[in-house]
Amino acid sequence: MNSELLTAPTSQSEPLVPHEPLGRLFLRFLRFGCLAWGGPVAQIGMIRQELVEEEHWISREQFNRVLAVYQVLPGPEAHELCVYFGMLARGRLGGLLAGVGFMLPGLLLVLLLSWAYLRFGLQSVAVAPIFGAMQVAVAALIVRAVFRIGRHALGKNWLIVIAVTSAAATLALGSVDSMLTHAAANRGLPQPSGIVLLAAGLKAGLLTFGGAYTAIPLLQHDAVLSAHAWMSNAQFLDGVALSGLLPAPLIIFATFVGYVGGGLAGALLITAGVFVPAFAFTLVGHQFFERLLSTPRVRVVLDGVMAAVVGLIAATAIGIVRSAVTDVEAAVLFTLVLLVLFATNSRWVIPAVIVGSAVWGAISPF
């Protein structure tokens, strides 16, 4: 990486990337991971505040250029930024340690929750209303994601046409909820092989343009709908809900999906598949992608891909809403959660609405 470019002086102050000991570097990003509440905006803001505004590792202008690259590439942007900063400090080994440190708290917590979910029968009748309410909150979160991603991705009429066409094509193949019902009624749930789990993670890791919500339809298809499906749709949505409670990129729900399919080994395989591309884009190809994405034709193609992804998420949202919002009480909860989500951008809003919905389910079960 061009160190001269990264340390060029600006009006902010002269950037200075510290040569931190590897252990201290790992602990710094482990701390970031322990505090990674509130989704990507809050996570990126935390990283920027400490490393750019306070310690001046790079200039604000360089940070904005780097962030723009990761916002276009697939994968969790906050995680990719951690890998990038770790690589600045101590090369590729530093990038690897920074990325692992940032994802480790969420990974360990979701493994614990996955174990408890299956070991103690959290799918039982006693707690089913709680998870049912949490699934309503997940449906509202995905609907909000469609609007938030679409607002930024669909700035031109031709992109709107692509998004609508993508959604219509997805729904024309059979509505998502009817596909789920048909899949559950006509076959059992097999035990997926390690290759199937790794492939599902890699596909999600390579195609998650626009954030973790893009991974939901991809992993849902593999885990719930495909010939190799290994979990129910209710279990899948429970995993998304539980992951929203953790200090981690939301895409960590893939670890839960893998755990249901293959225990600890399955969880680690699918997690590796999801995160390996994010590591690779930074450790191997950051400069290449920064140059490539400055090419207008490439940006146009990626804009079209992003519009199609918005349509795919919209179609998935329709199916999830239909499966989660099944009565008047669920519709009331769904409306309330949506109002809260659109009213605030607080870093705590996602865990707050999931916990609040769980309390609703416990007090007034569906």
Image (tube, rainbow, N blue to C red):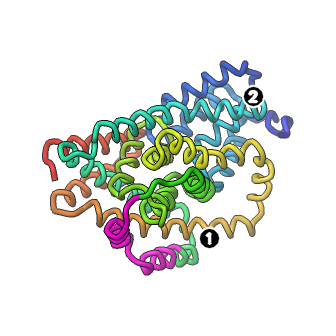
User: Of helix, strand and loop, which mostly describes the magenta segment?
Assistant: helix
Residue 82 located left or right of residue 210:
right
For the N terminus, which image quadrant?
top right
Q: Is residue 212 visible?
A: yes
Q: Is residue 295 above or below residue 74?
A: below
Viewer-closest of 129 and 26: 129
Q: Residue under label 1, please give it.
A: 304
Locate residue 64, reporting x and y percent: 67, 45
Mark 1 lies on a secondary structure that is helix
For mark 2, give the secondary structure.
helix
Which residue shows up at 35% across the image and 70% down it?
186
Q: Where is mark 2, residue-wise?
A: 89
Q: Nearer the viewer, residue 340 or 8?
A: 340
Tell whether 300 sits left or right of 153.
right
Marks 2,1: beta carbons within 8 A = no
Residue 217 falls left or right of residue 363: right
Residue type marked 1 = Gly
Above/below status of 109 relative to 193? above
Residue toward you, 221 or 190? 190
Q: Which residues are magenta?
A: 163-189
- Say whether residue 357 is magenta: no
Alpha-carbon span between mark 2 and mark 1: 35 Å
Residue 250 appears in the rendering: no
Q: Position of residue 189 (x, y in %)?
A: 40, 59
Amino acid at pointer 2 = Ala
Assess whether residue 184 is covered by the magenta stretch. Answer: yes
Looking at this view, name the residue that lies furthest to the left. Answer: 364
* Residue at x 21% of width, y 63% of height: 326
Look at 61% across and 33% down and name the residue there.
100
